[in-house]
Image: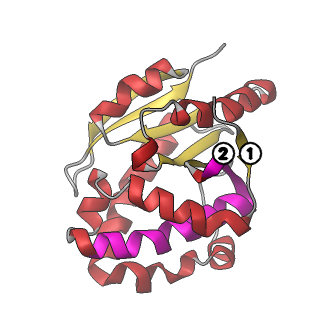
Amino acid sequence: MSEIARLSENEADAAGGVLARAFQDDPPFVHFLPDAAGRASILPAFFSRFARYGALFGELQGAAGGRGFAIWLSEHEMSSERMKLAGLDELPRIFGEEGLGRLSEFLAFMGKVHHGAMSRKHWYLAFIGVEPVHQGQWIGSALLRPMLARADAEGLPCYLETFLDSNVSFYKKNGFDLTAEGVEPTSKCRYWTFLSRKR
């Protein structure tokens, strides 16, 4: 069983590389950045900054050996000041005008879905990913357990969304109930939303 640890911003770059490879073919990112080679070169910069944000203002957790990472946020709204501290203010340069436009439209819609599903305080699983060569080794399940236990102790639910049909059974097996599904209109990506199961 993989040991899971809370990480500092010093591990953000390592997390960014793994998450970029894990999400290379994720439908929303294919929509934001259709060129595969360009996507592979851009995503590490995006995910390293998002991991830094998680470490500073939420939870960045990693599996032993850097095989997988999870980014949890306790507040869905991300302030511009905090985004600047994490380097996310550089998204226009990282994604380019077209990519950022697609990203912004997508996030606006999914933000409404998120707020509609969960209005009270909760933990939000923004991203979870495992190095592709280590997928299928229960690392993803191990990454979920510490925060699910903490959220239970705090009396808080956990919320997430996924855009891969193959992930639906994974989350159901790991303590989540499916709450909604639909299609994001600009990307045509199908989505599924989940809340942690009360235990």
Front-most of residues 108 and 161: 161
- Residue tagged by mark 1? 5
Regarding residue 63, the answer to whether it shows in the image is: no
Quadrant (top left, top right, bottom left, bottom right) of the C terminus: top right
Q: CA distance from mark 1 to mark 2?
A: 8 Å
Residue under the point 48% across and 57% down: 19
| Residues drawn in magenta | 38-65
Task: Farthest residue to the bottom: give it.
Answer: 93
Front-most of residues 183 and 120: 183
Q: Are marks 1 and 2 in contact (CB under 8 Å)?
A: yes
Q: Is residue 190 above or below residue 66?
A: above
Q: How many marks?
A: 2
Task: Farthest residue to the top: give it.
Answer: 199
Residue under the point 62% across and 73% down: 83
Residue under the point 65% across and 29% down: 145
Characterize the local packing of mark 2: few (<14), some (14-19) or many (20 or more) Cα atoms within 10 angstroms.
Answer: some
